[in-house]
Amino acid sequence: MEFRRGSNDDGLDRRFWGRSQALWSAAKREGRYPSLPNDLLYLSHWFSSVKLTQNSVIMPDTHTLVNDFLNKLKKRKIEGSKATAKLTAELLRSVISQQRLPNTNQAGALIHAIKAIGEQLTTANPVEVAVGNIVRRVLHIIREEDVSLTTASIGGLSLQGLSDDEEDNPLVSAAAAAAAARTTLRPPSLQTLLEDMTPHSAATALHHSSSSAGDSEDKTKSTDKNSRSRKLKHNVIETVNELIQDIATCHEQIAEQAVEHIHHNEVILTLGSSGTVIEFLCAAKEKKRSFRVFVAEGAPRYQGHTLAKELVARGLQTTVITDSAVFAMISRVNMVIVGAHAVMANGGVIAPVGLNMVALAAQRHAVPFVVLAGIHKLCPLYPHNPEVLLNELKSPSELLDFGELSDCMDFGIGTGSPLLHVVNPAFDYVPPKLVSLFITDTGGHNPSYMYRLIADYYSADDLVLQQRPTS
Amino acid sequence: MDPRRAPRTVIDPKVRQVGFFAPPDRSQSVPLSQSSNSPSSPPLSDLSPSGNSLSPVMIPPPRHLSDLSSLPITAGLPPTRLSPPVHRFSGESVVPIGSYNPSEFASPSVGDLFEDKNARSPGPRRSRGGGGSAKIASSLPAGGFELPPEVKPKSLTTVSVVSNLRPNVTEKVGEKSIESQDGSGANSKQPLKEKTSKAERRALQEAQRAAKAAAKGGNGVANIKTGKANSVQKKDNASVAAPSEKRLADHKDKDRKKDAPHPRMQFDDATRVEKAKKRAIVKQTEVRNRVELFRHLPQYEHGTKLPHLEYKFFSLNSNSVHPAVYKVGLRYLAGDISGGNARCIAMLQAFQESIMEYSAPPERALNRDLTAKINSYISYLIECRPLSISMGSAIKFVKTRIANLPLTLSESEAKANLLSEINHFINEKIILADKVIVRHAVTKVRDGDILLTYGSSSAVEMILLHAHELGKQFRVVIVDSRPKLEGRLLLRRLVAKGVSCTYVHINATSYIMHEVTRVFLGASSVLANGTVYSRVGTACVAMVANACGVPVIVCCEAYKFHERVQLDSICCNELGDPDAISKVHGRKEVNHLMDIADNENLQLLNLTYDVTPSDYVSMIITDYGMIPPTSVPVIVRELRKEQIWSG
């Protein structure tokens, strides 16, 4: 392995690296490995990924961070897509900030590193698509920043050639050019669409631009190089910070639209619990709307009880019903408002278990089925057999106590196949035709429009996080 | 004449051929009607419907010769409306005793005879029993549902009645003029077909009544269905000698009054609730936060009065509720007995016990006093828990039998008669019916099937166990839901028998449904519009199955069929214990609602039943065979006929 002690890195990073390396070698000497075998596995993974990414180096303390997070994901310690998304974004931010970048093709190196981590994260909990979403978002951010930066530098160069007085203030002009580039790049034009849709052309374009940037870099001074690499990092971190901010405030942005959707004396049905739904309903309540909420309890997790408690505390008329009474009550309901676990590119929803039933009942009675989803829940993948592949079976103890039927289970012993199965899935797939409306923090959307929204947020290059093995 | 007539008459035999009626159905109808003629000795063995189900999907063999002879009349495109009635009846008299003759009353010639009369009685002509069923119980729905006339009744009559019809024809014709005077004006919109069937029914009833009156030497037994209505019965007793047309007129007025669906006790009507409370034995307390949408239903706290009532058991005075009935009521209240069949059988057995120990006071007639007694029992049972449809049907039966007891019988004979009748009902309508259903349904279980069932239905359980005993290889998916978790009990029983099971919660239905090949559901009742009134959650399961293209098979005994119609689960339902919602069995950590249960903003709704739309149901398996939900009204009508004739 080759570690390049780059002259352009500050001492802080070096210090960290040295210390953790020492710790690691000490641990190795004593045969004291990190406690979990999983860690080892990931270490080997990590090393291999480091070998693969010869140009990039991941700092070991980010590595421990990654491992912690991986463990949490594996053990399903993190609940809820919002929390997961936030943690993922924060993790990636720290990874980026401690990433040492080579002189050439910085963006490529960064993307490579993030992809490597993203791959591990998504395999740790493939069901929690929010992780993959955030990884892809960050990758997209890096790409965009890189593009805007190169256009800016090209612009800066051309400016340099034109007038000398711009030279003593290159940062300002570059930033202005970057901003301009960003604004020109963002709006959906046919060209950007084409670039998004054709990964090869986009990739070649990127490589071309970076290599051309590298060519141009050769002419500039080393200090300029230094500032450019820092600038990329800086910009990316800045945007990731914005993303984290977005995730944190998406509830409020969704809740702001509540008044537009809930009228006076409305009867709303919801199932289970979702933070977004609570905020949404409470926002309407705060605007002096009076309405009534039916809460299906959402067995076997009974999150509906928590939701009901919250709503009652805020002074909303709440009726708790069993899940089985959904069909009976839906005929008196004006709107179904639910949260989602993830929204797929086709407009289908991975939702807490039981919602497919609610959606079917709502469709039967022509009741609008509204899904609230923050942008971090938008997944750019198209689902295949999502009921099985994007699902997760929880512990049967939520349905039956261990040993509850042990007194009458003598039969299955001899035959080898167990007599009793207890199935406790965590999620349901609601097909797009059953969804009336998505409310995201950017407004309301039809299920058929989700693919477009997704094209705004993700780059087509990143849809597959798995890296092809290098020959 | 009316062009709509002809196709309809043709429809009848067609319907019967494509339907899944096992051919021996006809043999079933015969003993039934025989028993009607000799109610004191019901031929129990003859009645076994299980013997009828040789092959559930067999097309009935060609009809009886006499049927064939009459077929041209029914099936001929322009019905021979002009054929003289005399000819019709003369043809009828050739029919050997006990034969089944479906076209007998479908023949338009009879309708011709009374066509005029019918044109004048457009109102829904419920049988006189309307009054009786209305009296049954405040919570027993006795809606004035008029049977759709599309399908001709498969008559259950016997020749003895038919032959009695003949002398009555003249009477009828005379009556016609009187009827036309007090008739309520012709309603030309009424389809002609309907008129005919009404006319037939009326004619037959009249004929039967006349026959009975003649046979019993003026004992004047009321019309069968009337039995429950004391007032009507009184009238009958009083007017034995009176000309039948006058009686008929009286009845007509009564009918009209009772034609309006009897209002179930509406609990948003304060005055009536107050009245009911005064009479009540079980003084239930209202729940704190009533659900606004269900103000019309009783919303009581559950279980709070039980210890007190149990204590009261020892101080029962003989005038009030019989101890056996009291015990059953308490078990309903405590939830020990649940499920339509179990509740019905428990009630009937309690009635039997009370009848056994009953002796009529010297100054009163047995059947009147006993009816009053039974009525008081029933109102007590309703206080404990609203009646199920199955119980309503059984009560109707018991009351009919009591009212129809010949006055010539001594008390002990009458009691013995009643006891055997009730036994007979339990055996025939519930136990044997279940056996028939099992036989039919087992043919629908193939090797390798994955059968899904919801909750715990006694019929479905029997089917699964029987199929397992037959050695079929299948797996059962038991869907369960809170708060009753009845599926767990079923799971336990099935696993103990070695049936391999999968247990899921109702929310996971759509997950598991992709594997399932058939859905078997039980029902509390099947309503006349084909909707299935059943344990809450059944509709959800049926809906998901429908969405996944899995056939939904509902198993329900025919005595649970009801002529009421219902579109949603709100208007008529039963509310369970609200506290069962906030307490989660076996999950101590889920207690968010415990401390805020008194908050006025929080309501807990524990529905007991829901209504499954008929389009989710692929097939209903009943003791009459396997039918589509659209044929439910036929069975309802058939049943009512049976009651009329066998009473």
Image: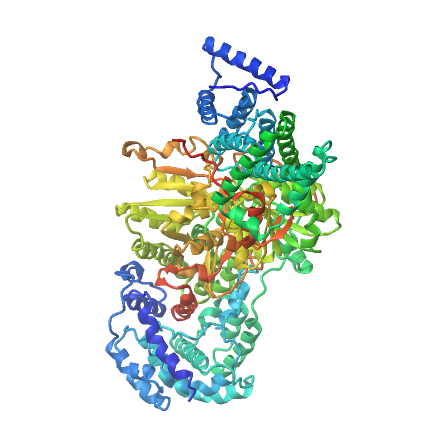
Instruction: Please tell me which residue lies in front, B533 or B380.
Output: B533
Is residue A202 rendered to the left or right of residue A415?
right
Question: Does residue A358 sit above or below B8 in this rendering?
Answer: above
Residue A116 is at least partly visible in this image: yes
Q: Position of residue B15 (x, y in %)?
A: 35, 72
Question: Does residue B32 sit above or below A379 in this rendering?
Answer: below
State the colouring used for the structure image: rainbow
Q: Residue at x 36, y 39 (%)?
A: B495
Which corner quadrant of the image does residue B259 belong to?
A: bottom right
Residue B319 is at least partly visible in this image: no
Instruction: Please tell me which residue lies in front, B598 or B199.
Output: B598
Q: Position of residue A38 (x, y in %)?
A: 45, 23
Number of on-image labels: 0
Q: Position of residue B548 (x, y in %)?
A: 42, 53
User: Residue reaching furthest top?
Assistant: A30
Is residue B598 rendered to the left or right of residue A424?
right
Instruction: Please tell me which residue lies in front, B499 or A455.
Output: A455
Is residue A206 rendered to the left or right of residue B56?
right
Question: Does residue B14 sit above or below B80 in this rendering?
Answer: above
Question: Does residue B137 sit above or below B122 in this rendering?
Answer: above
The C terminus of chain A sits in image quarter: top left
Q: Position of residue B370 (x, y in %)?
A: 49, 60
Instruction: Please tell me which residue lies in front, A318 or B470.
Output: A318
